[in-house]
Image (spheres, rainbow, N blue to C red):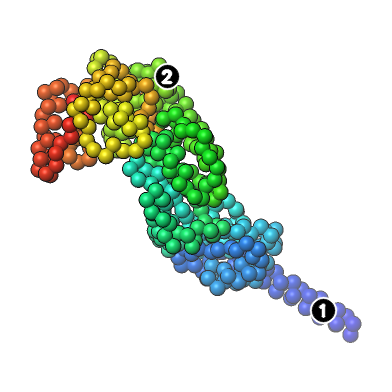
């Protein structure tokens, strides 16, 4: 009898082991296998959320098929206590294991809302936008220029959210004065900026910041980034580049930056100015004249006058020889690269061609034909051609 009981007990134990092993294998398969999501969603982890609360939320949102398996898997992988506050993008068919990795990785939120302060050449604007998880694209919620308008309610109501991402973006061609003045109006930053950095020394780029971050520290990062870019590209410069110092290249890059917004044209524009220097010609470029008038403190807002083109200033390249004394804006990486590696051309002239780009010329006769074509285009549009035509 006892042998029979023992045998039955052993059989039952083996069966239970088999069942447990099967359940464990099934649990592992469901934990690591494709999840139920058919499209991406945003999952928000609140501060202080427990694993149980998060697992229930994931099940309710359809991100996991079984909250219990998700909790067991988190415990088994020693990540149960590693949940990070924030909003996270969970892709379609993400396994429970992948979801757990996403929620415990830390760093910037990958979903939810973002504030981007775009500092531009003519205007600056604060843009609040939200990620549409289904399309993985941002939808604009609110936008305003802090220099001329108060923050809309949509912005003020959401700006205090803890997991809101913050970014400051500098456009290529902004001046250092514009950067400093714009940052002063960034209410989400703190601290003073002691002085306007030298022109050209700030890198046009996008910068992750935090609410309450230090303005001076941000400017220092902009300067450090531009310094690294210039040093890196200086080492790859063309042997024919006519600069004695990286600073001279930065001056040329700023001129190229202000002359064209088309990336593909920049090496050609740079070649015009390099060729002019080689032939002893003056640069004759309007943006330098404008900088001599405005000192980079805002846009001129009108065309140049003949008297201004004739007036001697250290930035009037219609009058002075060679480069102006400093950059006239903060050039981006592509313009610095173009200045250091200009295209191999015979061009010494260029003028707008009506399409947003420029027509280049090797001789004055060719250039005059291009200018005449440009003036006809302007006349057809009912516009008065500017007094100064680039490089004429």
Picture residue at 66% right of the left edge, 57% below the top: 82
Q: Secondary structure at mark 2?
A: loop
Find residue 374 and name its label. Answer: none
Residue 165 visible? The answer is yes
Q: Quadrant of residue 69?
A: bottom right
Q: Nearer the viewer, residue 334 or 304?
A: 304
**Residue 181 at what x, y percent from top left?**
43, 41
The residue wearing badge 1 is 9
The residue under label 2 is: 245
- Whether residues under marks 2 and 1 lie with C-beta atoms below 8 angstroms apart, the answer is no
The answer to which quarter of the image holds residue 246 is: top left
- x, y (%) of residue 320? 28, 18
Residue 306, quarter of picture: top left
Taking 334 as reference, is 238 above or below it? above
Residue at x 35%, y 31% (from the top left corner) = 295
Q: Is residue 337 visible?
A: no
- From the top left corner, tell me how far across and down residue 128 is, in percent: 43, 56
- The residue carrying pointer 1 sits among few (fewer than 14), some (14 to 19) or many (20 or more) residues within 10 Å by Cα, namely few
Quadrant (top left/top right/bottom left/bottom right) for the C terminus:
top left
């Amino acid at each position: 009898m006892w042998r029979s009981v023992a045998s039955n007990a052993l059989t039952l134990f083996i069966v239970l082991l088999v069942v447990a092993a099967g359940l464990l294998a099934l649990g592992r398969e469901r934990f690591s296998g494709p999840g139920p999501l058919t499209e991406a969603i945003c999952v928000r982890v609140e501060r202080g959320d427990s694993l149980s609360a998060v697992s229930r939320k994931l099940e309710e949102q359809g991100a996991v098929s079984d909250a219990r398996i998700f909790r067991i898997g988190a415990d088994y992988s020693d990540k149960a206590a590693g949940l990070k506050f924030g909003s996270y993008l969970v892709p379609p068919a993400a396994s429970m294991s992948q979801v757990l990795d996403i929620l415990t990785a830390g760093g910037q939120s990958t979903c939810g809302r973002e504030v981007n302060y775009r500092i531009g050449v003519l205007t600056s604007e604060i843009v609040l936008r939200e990620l549409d998880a289904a399309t993985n694209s941002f939808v604009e919620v609110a936008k305003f220029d802090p220099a001329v308008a108060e923050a809309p309610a949509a912005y003020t109501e959401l700006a205090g959210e803890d997991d809101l991402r913050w970014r400051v973006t500098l456009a290529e061609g902004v001046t250092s004065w514009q950067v400093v003045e714009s940052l002063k109006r960034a209410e989400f930053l703190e601290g003073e900026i002691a002085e306007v950095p030298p022109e050209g020394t700030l890198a046009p780029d996008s910068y992750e910041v935090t609410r309450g971050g230090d303005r001076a520290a941000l400017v220092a990062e902009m300067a450090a980034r531009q310094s690294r870019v210039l040093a890196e590209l200086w080492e790859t410069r063309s042997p024919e580049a006519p600069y004695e110092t990286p600073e001279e290249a930065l001056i040329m890059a700023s001129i190229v930056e202000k002359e064209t917004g088309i990336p593909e044209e920049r090496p050609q524009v740079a070649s015009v100015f390099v060729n002019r220097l080689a032939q002893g010609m003056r640069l004759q470029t309007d943006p330098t004249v404008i900088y001599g008038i405005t000192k980079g403190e805002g846009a001129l807002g009108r065309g140049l006058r003949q008297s201004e083109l004739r007036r001697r200033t250290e930035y009037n390249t219609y009058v002075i020889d060679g480069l102006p004394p400093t950059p006239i804006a903060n050039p981006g990486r592509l313009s610095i690269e173009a200045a250091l590696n200009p295209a191999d051309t015979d061009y010494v002239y260029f003028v707008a061609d009506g399409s947003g780009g420029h027509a280049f010329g090797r001789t004055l006769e060719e250039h005059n034909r291009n200018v005449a074509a440009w003036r006809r285009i302007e006349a057809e549009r009912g516009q008065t051609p500017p007094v100064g035509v680039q490089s004429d």
